[in-house]
Amino acid sequence: MLDPSRFTVFVTGATSGFGEAICRRFAAAGARIVACGRRADRLETLKAELGDRCHAFALDVRDAKAVHAAVAALPAPFDEIDVCVANAGLALGLEPAHQADFDEWQQMIETNCLGLAATVHAVLPGMVARGRGHVVTLGSIAGDHPYPGGNVYGATKAFVRLLAQNLRADLAGTGVRATNIEPGLAETEFSLVRFRGDAERAGGLYRGADPITAEDVAETVFWSTTMPAHLNIVRMEIMPTSQGFGPTVVKRR
Ligand code: NDP
Ligand code: 8X3
């Protein structure tokens, strides 16, 4: 097993949900954390909690130039990223395609595809030069299983899955690993964002479903990145026990 206390872990979308839990999981194991997201106030709170082992700054991943500049400007001892968790992402709306808002489609594509690609592109050259590193992308079961209203969100996650698999093809022999984590129904702020702040509707989705928790996802990221260096977990699809093959197939209590 690799020693996580030696890792520098870069996490996008660290202000909430999976990203925040991933920062906490690695920090508890002694890793250095580079945390970013758009909400600076939440980053300050996370930095206050994690202390000197955490370097945090506001970053909108849709700004590809800013992503590259931020990675290039990382101060020591945070400048050699061992694990990059390209997690920032969102779904907006659950309307059928013919009723969807195009601005929301654009925001999903710019965040989940362009922003994630910029993140990966910014960190890879350093990892390959060092001969070690691990890129973890947050896909989704929605990238594999179509569902009504999933339209562009699912398509962005299919992009993430194929990018992660193609990274494996390019990175073979470099010592750098790539893993796509593909969760199903997980309770975070995800649905609050998707339903544009409608807490009642978001809560209803999780009620009685025993959904995945942010900590569950953090544990899968931690596990896959601490596996021995010769082993690459390529994809990991994880669902609540209550969920069948697809986000809409949930058996509630
Ligand atoms: P949350 O809404 O709780 O967290 C999303 C994070 O992404 C926040 O920290 C948010 O930070 C950040 N983010 C969104 N847009 C941007 C942006 N333009 N630039 C930088 N950061 C951004 O949701 P989750 O933790 O659940 O989602 C994390 C990832 O996991 C996403 O990619 C999501 O698609 C994926 N996923 C979620 C599932 C679920 O059911 N919850 C299941 C499968 C995958 P801020 O707003 O401060 O910028
Ligand atoms: C989010 C999972 O099931 O809500 O990526 O589409 S689901």
Image (cartoon, helix red, strand yellow):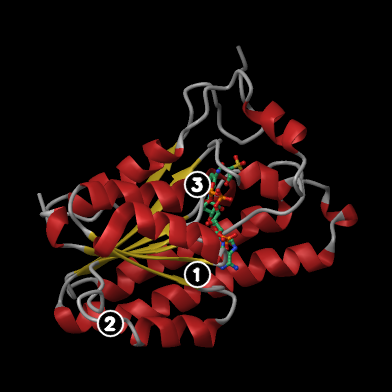
Q: Secondary structure at mark 2?
A: loop
State if disc 3 and disc 1 touch (CB < 8 Å): no
Question: Residue 185: x and y, percent?
Answer: 56, 35
Q: Nearer the viewer, mark 3 or mark 2?
A: 2
Q: Nearer the viewer, mark 1 or mark 3?
A: 3
Q: Which residue is mark 3?
A: 17
Residue at 29%, 59% in the rendered image: 51
Residue at 53%, 82% in the rendered image: 64
C-alpha separation, residue under disc 3 versus residue under disc 2: 26 Å
Label 2 CB-ligand 1 distance < 8 A: no
Label 3 CB-ligand 1 distance < 8 A: yes
For the question of whether residue 234 can be seen, the reply is no
In this view, which residue lies farthest toward the front?
48
Quarter in which the C terminus is drawn? top right
Q: Which residue is mark 2?
A: 75
State if disc 1 and disc 2 touch (CB < 8 Å): no
Label 1 CB-ligand 1 distance < 8 A: yes
Q: Which residue is mark 1?
A: 116
Question: Residue 220: x and y, percent?
Answer: 32, 43
Say which amino acid is labelled 3. Gly
In this view, which residue lies farthest toward the right?
99
Q: Residues within 10 Å of mark 2 (few under 14, many from 20)?
A: few
Question: Residue 77: x and y, percent?
Answer: 20, 76
Say which amino acid is labelled 2. Pro
Q: Pick whichever of labels 1 and 3 is earlier in the sequence.
A: 3
242 or 64, nearer to the observer = 64
Residue at 25%, 79% in the rendered image: 79
> Where 189 falls versus 40 (above or below)?
above
Q: Nearer the viewer, mark 2 or mark 1?
A: 2
